[in-house]
Image: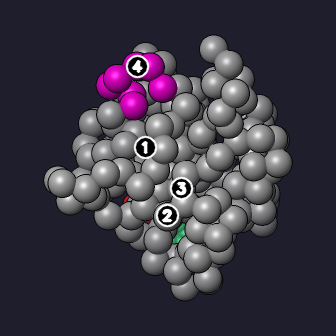
Amino acid sequence: MAAPVLGLVGSAAGGLEEILPKLVEPMIERGWRVAVTLTPTAATWLKATGDFDKIEQVTGLPVRVKPRLPGEESPHPKIDCYAVVPATSNTVGKLALGLADNQALTQVCEAIGGGTVPVVVFPRINAAHARQPSWDSHTSALTRAGVHLVMGDDVWPLHEPRSAPGKQLPWDAIIDAIVSAAQR
Ligand SMILES: Cc1cc2nc3c(=O)[nH]c(=O)nc-3n(C[C@H](O)[C@H](O)[C@H](O)COP(=O)(O)O)c2cc1C
């Protein structure tokens, strides 16, 4: 049987710098292929550290940032499960509203609307993001659409801006959510 393909979408939030060792490599070890797409800001961050090129080497696939030309084929295989990790408050809000103004959002908005490819989202946010007046309606809209949100006090307690202890993302909970979403 062909290896399942994870469409990993990274946005410009804390923890992005760890996606290679904490998510890409563990998923490959579990037998998955991983096709990475980054928001434009996330791409600048990972190009600055050199991880952009390393991810391409490890996954054997180009990291997507820009949309393809109308006549071009997608450089990624068919995706079996999307994971938006880490997801900024900005990217979560745009997904909830169906705004697709970059390649990362385009892919995930299509998956949410299509309803056949599971979507897991880990919002890497702080308490101020969650108090933004539209936050609850954004997470409710995504939940109603069947998106698996990895959030809550047990996995990611919210801290005020710039007061969070240097905390690891809940990588085990994220991987469990991906594996379980893909089995449904
Ligand atoms: C150093 C730094 C860290 C940031 N961390 C976060 C974060 O953890 N969560 C978040 O929602 N936004 C964070 N932001 C703000 C986002 O990067 C910003 O809203 C950006 O426009 C998001 O773009 P994107 O969603 O297209 O990746 C951070 C910004 C900087 C400069």
* Mark 4 vs 1, N-terminal side: 1
- Choose between 116 and 144: the one closer to the eye: 116
Q: Is 120 inside the magenta-drawn segment?
A: no
Query: Is the shortest distance between ligand 1 and the CB of mark 3 under 8 Å?
Result: no
Q: Which marked residue is nearer to the observer: mark 3 or mark 1?
A: 3
Q: Which marked residue is nearer to the observer: mark 4 or mark 1?
A: 4
Query: Is the shortest distance between ligand 1 and the CB of mark 1 under 8 Å?
Result: yes
**Residue ID at (69%, 65%):** 58
* Mark 3 vs 1, N-terminal side: 3
> What residue would you read off at disc 3?
36
**Badge 3 amino acid:** Val
C-alpha distance separating marks 3 and 1: 18 Å
**Residue ID at (27%, 36%):** 98
Q: Are marks 3 and 2 in contact (CB under 8 Å)?
A: yes
- Choose between 91 and 35: the one closer to the eye: 35
Which quadrant, please, contains the N terminus? top right
C-alpha distance separating marks 2 and 1: 21 Å
* Mark 3 vs 4, N-terminal side: 3
> What residue would you read off at disc 1?
92
**Position of residue 109 measured from the top left corner of the image (x, y, whole percent):** 34, 36
> What residue would you read off at disc 4?
115
**Position of residue 7 measured from the top left corner of the image (x, y, whole percent):** 53, 44
C-alpha distance separating marks 4 and 2: 24 Å
**Badge 2 amino acid:** Val
Disc sitting over residue 63 in the figure? 2
Disc count in the image? 4
Q: Which marked residue is nearer to the observer: mark 4 or mark 2?
A: 2
Q: Quadrant of residue 183?
A: top right
Disc sitting over residue 117 in the figure? none
- Please report the bounds of the magenta region as a residue range: 111-117
